[in-house]
């Protein structure tokens, strides 16, 4: 029963007392009982606040102040005399007690309502859940911002490299006859010959791509068997072509340089990623760089006549002959890479949102990741397992 209900009930009980009893004395008794009840309730809240040891310092002080205020009211000589005096009751003092007590009850009720979440376990649990949800939301936004910042950093071109690309493009424009592309059937045959060793490099870093190609060629015993497929964005296409024509790794290895736009399947109707990027104004300026990073999921479409390729990042320097990787038995698996279990980027939990039930149900957050620098892909196994279709399914079902 609430305080107001208790007060009404006791008032009714006083009104129903036998005739002859002084109603004012009954009222005094009710008011004193109500004051003591209120005092006990405040002290109980204050005691709970002391034991809770959470953010209760402000509430504890408020409860203590109100308890002291009620005690002071009851300790006033005039108020005390109401209960002790068996004679007539002073109406003025009675009104003063009633008014003071009414004000104190109103204040303490409000204090108890304000402090409810500190003492109600259901409220505390709900508040904790809301806090966890808010923190997860902040974490998701922070990860997206981190990814965006990383993209900006990766897309930013050092001044020296940018000037190099501009100079190479200028060379092509001023000496256009030296860079006319002539159809080479012999080259086309090698580019589609599955018996050769094929490497794929997705990069807009001219010098990085050049170092990768030259390091592979430098360490191989049979450079004539090695074919390189370099894919870049439209802005760097001709700089790449001019550079490798001016500075080829040797006279027997073959290099194909294409831009993203040369692959007709890179469009919103086929690639969910393109739809997502085109619909996000913030990511639109990084469209080419994002697509370059995700083209690895479309290797069978890019090279339909090949059986196996090695994907190399543009920050790799090869120090051994990689030819044996093309003969390695993958036992029907699609992908081979070097496992990495050390460092901040070594677990799946860093790369995926495991708060999504679809992800947590399928994958282990503590599983070791793998190095991105060198990856071997069996394109026949890829086509058999329909990995690109599975990749599209994950993109549509799993919201990062």
Image: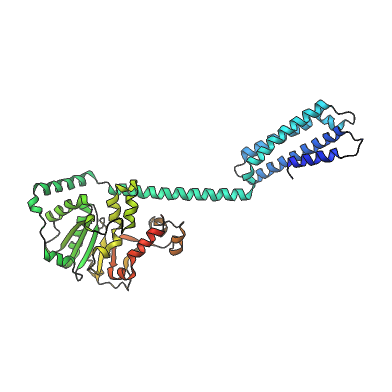
Q: Residue at x 33, y 66 (%)?
A: 387
In which quadrant is the N terminus drawn? Answer: top right
Q: Residue at x 82, y 31 (%)?
A: 80
**Position of residue 187 measured from the top left corner of the image (x, y, whole percent):** 13, 64
Q: Can residue 238 be seen in this view?
A: yes
The single residue placed furthest to the front in the displayed view is: 269
Q: Residue at x 22, y 43 (%)?
A: 159
Q: Nearer the viewer, residue 287 or 199?
A: 287
**Position of residue 362 measured from the top left corner of the image (x, y, whole percent):** 43, 64
User: Image quarter for residue 306?
Assistant: bottom left
Q: Is residue 339 left or right of residue 255?
A: right
Q: Is residue 223 visible?
A: no
Colouring of the image:
rainbow
Q: Which of 279 and 159 is in front in this view?
A: 279
The single residue placed furthest to the right in the displayed view is: 20
Q: In this view, does 112 lie to the left or right of 163?
A: right
In which quadrant is the C terminus drawn? Answer: bottom left
Q: Nearer the viewer, residue 93 or 200?
A: 93
Q: Which residue is drawn at 70% across and 35% down?
A: 106
């Amino acid at each position: 029963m609430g305080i107001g209900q208790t007060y009404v009930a006791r008032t009714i009980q006083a009104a129903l007392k036998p005739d002859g009893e002084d109603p004012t004395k009954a009222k005094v008794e009710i008011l004193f009982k109500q004051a003591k009840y209120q005092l006990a309730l405040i002290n109980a809240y204050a005691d709970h606040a002391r034991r809770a040891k959470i953010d209760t310092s402000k509430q504890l002080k408020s409860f203590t102040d109100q308890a002291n205020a009620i005690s002071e009211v009851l300790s006033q000589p005039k108020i005390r005399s109401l209960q002790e005096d068996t004679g007539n009751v002073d109406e003025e003092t009675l009104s003063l007690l009633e008014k003071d007590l009414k004000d104190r009850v109103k204040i303490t009720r409000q204090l108890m309502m304000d402090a409810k979440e500190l003492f109600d376990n259901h409220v505390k649990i709900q508040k904790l859940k809301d806090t966890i949800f808010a923190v997860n939301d902040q974490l998701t936004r922070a990860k997206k911002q981190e990814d965006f910042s990383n993209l900006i950093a990766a897309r930013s071109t050092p001044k020296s490299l940018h000037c190099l690309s501009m100079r190479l493009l200028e060379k092509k424009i001023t000496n256009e006859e030296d860079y006319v592309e002539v159809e080479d059937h012999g080259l086309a045959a090698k580019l589609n010959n599955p018996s050769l060793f094929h490497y794929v490099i997705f990069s807009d870093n001219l010098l990085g791509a050049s170092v990768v190609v030259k390091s592979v060629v430098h360490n191989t015993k049979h450079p004539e068997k090695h074919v390189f497929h370099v894919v870049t964005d439209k802005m760097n296409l001709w700089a790449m072509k001019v550079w490798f024509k001016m500075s080829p790794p040797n006279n027997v290895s073959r290099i194909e340089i294409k831009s993203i736009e040369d692959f007709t399947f890179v469009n919103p109707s086929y690639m969910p990623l393109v739809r997502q990027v085109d619909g996000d104004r913030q990511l639109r300026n990084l469209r080419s760089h994002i697509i370059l990073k995700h083209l690895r999921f479309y290797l069978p479409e890019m090279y339909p006549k090949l059986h196996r390729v090695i994907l190399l990042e543009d920050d790799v320097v090869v120090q051994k002959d990689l030819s044996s990787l093309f003969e390695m038995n993958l036992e029907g698996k699609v992908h081979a890479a070097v496992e990495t279990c050390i460092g901040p980027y070594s677990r799946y939990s860093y790369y995926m949102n495991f708060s999504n039930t679809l992800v947590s149900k399928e994958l282990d957050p503590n599983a070791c990741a793998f190095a991105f620098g060198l990856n071997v892909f069996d394109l026949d196994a890829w086509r058999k397992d329909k990995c690109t279709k599975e990749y599209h399914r994950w993109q549509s079902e799993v919201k990062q």
